[in-house]
Each structure stands twice: as C-alpha cells, then as structure tokens.
Image (cartoon, rainbow, N blue to C red):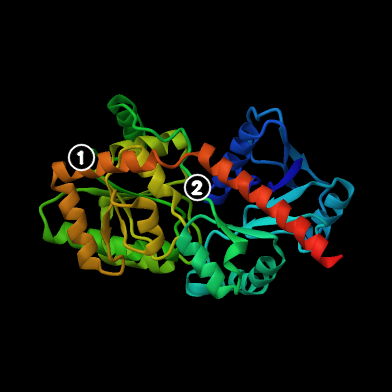
Amino acid sequence: MRIGIDGLPLASVKTGIGHYTCELARALARFAPQHEFELLSFLPPSAETDGELPGNLHQVQAKKRRFWWGVGLPLHLRHSPVSLFHGTNYEIPLWSGCPTVVNIHDLSLLLYPETHLSHTVRRGRQRLPLVARRATTIITATEFAKREVCEHLKVASEKVMVTPYAQRSTFRPLAKAETEEVRRRLGIEDVFLLFVGTIEPRKNLVTLVRAFGELLRNSSLRSQLVIAGPEGWRTSDLFAEIEKAALNDRLKFTGYLSDYDLCALYSSCTGFVFPSLYEGFGLPLLEAMACGAPVITSNIPTIVEVTGAAAHLINAKDVDELARAIVAVVSDSGKREHLSRAGLARAAQFTWERTAQLTFDVYAETLERARKNRRKNK
C-alpha cells in the first residue's frame, strides 16, 4: 500500500499536532516496512523536521496550488493515487477518490468558541461537519473525545476509533548537571513551577497567574512561575492580569523551546501545572510525567483519562483550590516524590509503537469499510 499523510503540520515550527504527525509517520513506517508512506504538502518541511527518515517514508512537496484541500490535493491524488489518505489535522480532501481517515483532536472550536479567533471558529463550524460526514473513519485520542464527536457531529460510534497518543522518546529524566546548565542559561531559579503549551485562552493561564499571585501574597513559599511556549491568540486578558498581579521577577516567559531545554525544565521543576479548561488529549502532561515532574492538572474527563491516578487533580476554575494544590506540592517533598514515581509509571504505558499499531489497525478497518461500501453501492 501507499499511504498519504497530511504533511502541512510539518511546514512550520512544530507544536502538538506537528509532533503527532511527525512521530506517527516515523512509527508507522517502522511498524509496516512493507508499505510506503508519503507526507504530502505544497510547502517544504521546516528545518527541524529534517533528518533521517525510514526508507519507506517520503516527504512529497506537490506543486503549489490555490485551494489546496478543495483542488490542489485532489488533483495531486488523481495523478499520484494512494491507497488511503490520513488527515492528521482536522482536514481531508472532500473529493479524493480514496478512503480517508481524519483526526478530530477536540471540539473546542464548537464547544469553546470564545477561546478562538472568530474567523477560525467560522471555518470550523463550516468544515468540521462536512469532514466528519465525508471521512471514512475518524480518529480521536480519548474515549471522551469520541463521545463528544459522536454527540455533536452526529457520527455513528462505529465510525470513530480511539488511538491514544504518546510522548516522544527524547522526554526522560535528565541529570542534575544538565538541568542546571539549561536553567542558568534561561535565568530560571532552583524552585519553579512550569507550564508548557501555546499561550491561548483555553489553557486557563489567567487562573494560574491569579493562583500564583495569591500564593506569593499569602504564604512564605518563594517560587518562580515559568511559562514555556509560543504566544498564540487572544492574550490581552492574560497580560492585563499579569500587570494587575505585579509579579515582577517571579514570572518568566521563555517562548518556544527545543526538546532538550523542555526536557531539562520538566526534569527539574518543583511542579508542572496544567490547568487547562478543555483538552482532546494533552501531550505536555505525558511529556512532563515521562521526565518525572510532579503534575498538578485539571479534573476534566480527558485529562483524568490520560493521567489516571498519577496527578494531583483540581477544579481548574477555582483559583483558591489551585493555589492550595500548588502549596501542597511545593511544600511536601514526599508528595512530589509520589507524584513523580506515579507519573513515570503512567507515561511508560504510552508508546508510539503502540499508537502506530492501533493506527494501522484503523487503516485496515477503513479499507475494509470502503470495500463494503463500494459493494453495497453497486
């Protein structure tokens, strides 16, 4: 078989979906060496995607065309057909001539439109129902996300398959000497709380800043809050809250970091705090746990499904509860050690090899479903 995979998430600096696409493609090529895999895009991959690929995984840059999903990609697939196309970022060509698999990572565009830019919400409301209807199979990362897709997009349960994601192998506990070098270079103190992710409303950083400010005012604990990740959208409320809280040198933004620097921060933070209001999965949680970070996070269903009993769970909308959780973890070395061990054990259950095997099972089921549909329509 030749499997086409959406390569557009690899055309810019990678965040969650870009990492998912890259790691899945590599793992699939290793898992099924008898098949060919192509990362299809009209844009070149970013420099950080360069590197040795398995011999049966190829990056294919099609001729650049306007209307890529509606015209360019369907024309490319007509001239260079594949057995199946996998859209890893909510999109597939609606007219492709081959069976299609699409990832719907979450429904935040529909369920939390206030956390996105208005033009993105409009496109999502138009495209997501069409994509869900036209795709042969839909992939979600959690059972809760599957239930949401079935309910809100009116999709039959048998059409949606769950394949959990995994952390990259680079995320592992680093030695103290390595973490100290990174922290010195970045200007980060010994005791610090860490958040990792794109800075956008759904991540609930306003509540984190309020809780951190309360901790500084009402406890003797001295800590630094480090926010690592690129700036996203609708950040004005967050920066207004930061100015109001007058955190001064207690708050540090690092911007986008390399995997090595992230690994060093995960490995040495006093606590990893991830108070997200909504997630389809939450890859930073697995990365943090794989490095031994004690995790404080939201008690929303998808996160509970991912972390199990390996995290300190809180109501992410409750500033006081989040502040108390931070104090409990920062002040209790025994609790931190317990969360660290539990996180390492939990993260070890998620591997890209398993994700690739489950995804390949999805491909086999998709091709069989497509064959049945063709026979039915004859």
| Residue type at tag 1 | Glu
User: Which comes before the other along the chain, label 1 or label 2?
Assistant: 2
Q: For mark 2, what is the residue?
A: 165
Image quarter of residue 74? bottom right
Q: Amino acid at mark 2?
A: Tyr
Q: Indicate the quadrant containing the C terminus: top left, top right, bottom left or bottom right.
A: bottom right
Q: Secondary structure at mark 2?
A: loop
State whether residue 168 is above or below residue 227: above
Q: Residue furthest left?
A: 220
At label 1, counting other C-alpha atoms closer than 10 Å, the crowd grade (few under 14, some 14-19, many 20 or more) is some
Q: Nearer the viewer, mark 1 or mark 2?
A: 2
- The mark found on residue 337 in the picture is 1
Of residues 13 and 80, the one drawn nearer to the viewer in this rendering: 80
* Residue found 78% across the figure and 47% down from its top: 83
Percent position of residue 351, x then y: 47, 39
For label 2, the crowd category at 10 Å Cα-Cα, with few meaning under 14, some 14 to 19 and many 20 or more, is many
